Image (cartoon, rainbow, N blue to C red):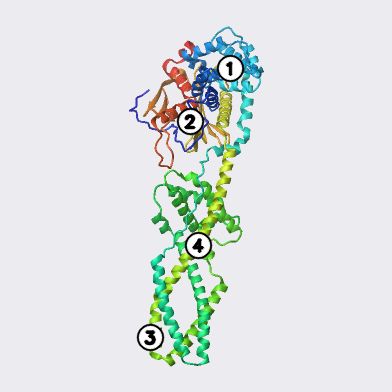
Amino acid sequence: MSGPDTVNTAGPHSFVGVQAGEVWNSDIYVVGPDDPPEREYELGVKYLECGVPDKARDHIERALNRGYDSSRVRFHLVLALLSKRSYRDLDRRNLETLKALSGRLIPDTEGAGEEAWHEALRVVLMLVACVDGSDADPDTVVDRLQALPNPQRDLALRHLGLVLTGSMKQAIWKKYQETAKRDRTSNDRTERAWIYFQPEPAPARARRPRPPSTGGWDVFGAVLLAGGVLFLFFSLLRSALGHGSMAALLACLVTLVLLPAAGWHIALWDHKRRRVIAALKDQSPRASQRTLPDNGFTERVESTFEHYFGKYTPVSEKRADWLETTKGIRRAQSREVARIYRETGVRPGQVNWLIRFLVRDVQQRRNAGLPLRPEEIHRVAKATKARCQALCALSALGIGFVIVAAFQHAPVVTVGCVSALVFLSRFAIPLWLGIYSERRRFREETREHMDILAARKAEYERWKDFLDRNRPTETEMEKWLEADKTLILHEAMSYHRLAWHEVITHAFLPTPDRPCKNAKMKGGPLRYSKYVIRIFLITNEGVREASAELDFERASWLLSERDNYRFDALSSVQVEMSSRYNYTLNITLTNGPTKSTIVSETPTLVGTDIARPKEEDQNETTKINLEAAGFPHTLRVLEGIAAEGKPWFDRQ
């Protein structure tokens, strides 16, 4: 191995490694110092089910040392020692533990239900005796293994895949295949696997209405101006009534009745116009560029909006036309989502549920024939426009008669009142229109905010409940991956026309196939939506290598690369360590390029500013990921071949 100063690079024939996209908080990997030994044992079993046997062994041994002893506990401890290892991988401590467990095989007196576990433990230890050369009949052991009831038989078969070799593996290989075919699509895998990689949804939020832009001083000024306008207006009416004619009286009455109605219609029309202008401003490109931070979050949100708008295109629309029609809506909605979720800790993927909800709502409104553009949503009805125009015309006519009558009675006063009235109205009318519009807008947006937030909360609860009910467990994810690896192994052996008695040992090296989604339970191994599964089959003549591209969500794969080389063709196997967390496996052949595989990197969260995990947490995560990938066994096999070739296996 090279030292920490080695630079980690990836060139041709390289596989890019690890980034933690989603980390689920869960207590399934947590045990407290005051917890009983049963909890230690349960946690060890959980780690074993999830493909991390070393952690499983530590917890089960602690439970056993604290007095929690039974055939079931010892059976799981043996599986933890042997899982993802061949017999050659066992060190002296492991062998001593197996020997101690063999010496404790006493007739079971632990109560009903333990007989099957006791028999399973005996069979597994007899199988180990066959492998290490002790006096045991392999055919008898295999028969007893296949005769075990479930779940003991399936557990033994699943975790002893590397221990069983030669004729023993050949005798039960068909059972392995049947189990893998059954497990591969069990529990609605193709309908549920994608849910594991879905991020925890961010809680529902909605943009709060902007407070009215007009304050107390605006109202105070408007009241003063209104007082002046009313004083001048009533002075003008008094002068007109002084004329003493019936026409003047009628004009004053018409003006007093129609002018307030006309003013209300004008205020409503102006309010609608202001709402349209504000909405169009939100949809303008310049507004989005000016108000949103350039931190990557906004770009991801905008691209997600565009993706879902293209996906949820109404049947009556063409995709290109629909995207062009909704361009402004996309800008406004992406701006809103970015503004309310851009704080540290919320990643773009966590708001995808809200984006889908908003896009579906726009699609449903279009399908229902409801308006989408701001000028359509806040459009003033034709009847309202007609009434406003008629009221304004009649009011203007009435004011004209009032001015004429007042001028005939008191021309100087009338000219002064009209001049002052025009001057004050120039400031009073816009100010009152603004105050009215802002107050009404705030009330409308407050009601809209409550309705929108209630709808989003309902969608959030629905989506979260769907994820919680259907998210695969760690056990299911590991079972599906093991089934895929078994069937890929079968396909590789069929291609190379190999039988198990010709295979000395084999090794897997699963790595992520970038770009792909990834997620993990806190304390568990990383899972990927796409893998490159590399298989090494060691025979008496050399090494057969095969690679398969696995789409984990769809449960499908394709053998993409095959290679064969003699033992002496493998010139070196090197692990580069650019840090204690970053591992790159380099395999060099005498007549070919170096194949580099990044098997571990420092875990990072994509698209977030969350602080890095503690150093001990990173180190623990790296160990779990390497162990779950079966890297220690694969590395030991390849290093043995590179160092000694075929004699290494003969000596082992």
Q: Amino acid at mark 2?
A: Gly
Q: Nearer the viewer, mark 4 or mark 2?
A: 4
Which residue is labeled 2 in the image?
A: 523
At numbered mark 3, what does the secondary structure look like: helix, strand or loop? helix
Distance between the alpha carbons at the discs numbered 3 and 1: 108 Å
177 w.r.t. 141: above or below: below
Which residue is labeled 4 in the image?
A: 443
Q: Nearer the viewer, residue 337 or 43?
A: 43
Residue 96 locus on image (x, y percent): 49, 12
Distance between the alpha carbons at the discs numbered 1 and 4: 69 Å
Residue pictured at 38% horizontal, 85% vertical: 416
How many residues crowd around disc 3 within 10 Å: few (fewer than 14), some, or many (20 or more)?
Answer: few
Tag count:
4
**Do tag 4 and tag 2 residues touch (Cβ < 8 Å)?**
no
**Do tag 1 and tag 2 residues touch (Cβ < 8 Å)?**
no
Distance between the alpha carbons at the discs numbered 3 and 2: 85 Å
Q: Amino acid at mark 4?
A: Arg
Which residue is labeled 3 in the image?
A: 416
How many residues crowd around disc 2 within 10 Å: few (fewer than 14), some, or many (20 or more)?
Answer: some
Which residue is labeled 1 in the image?
A: 70
Q: Nearer the viewer, residue 539 or 149?
A: 149
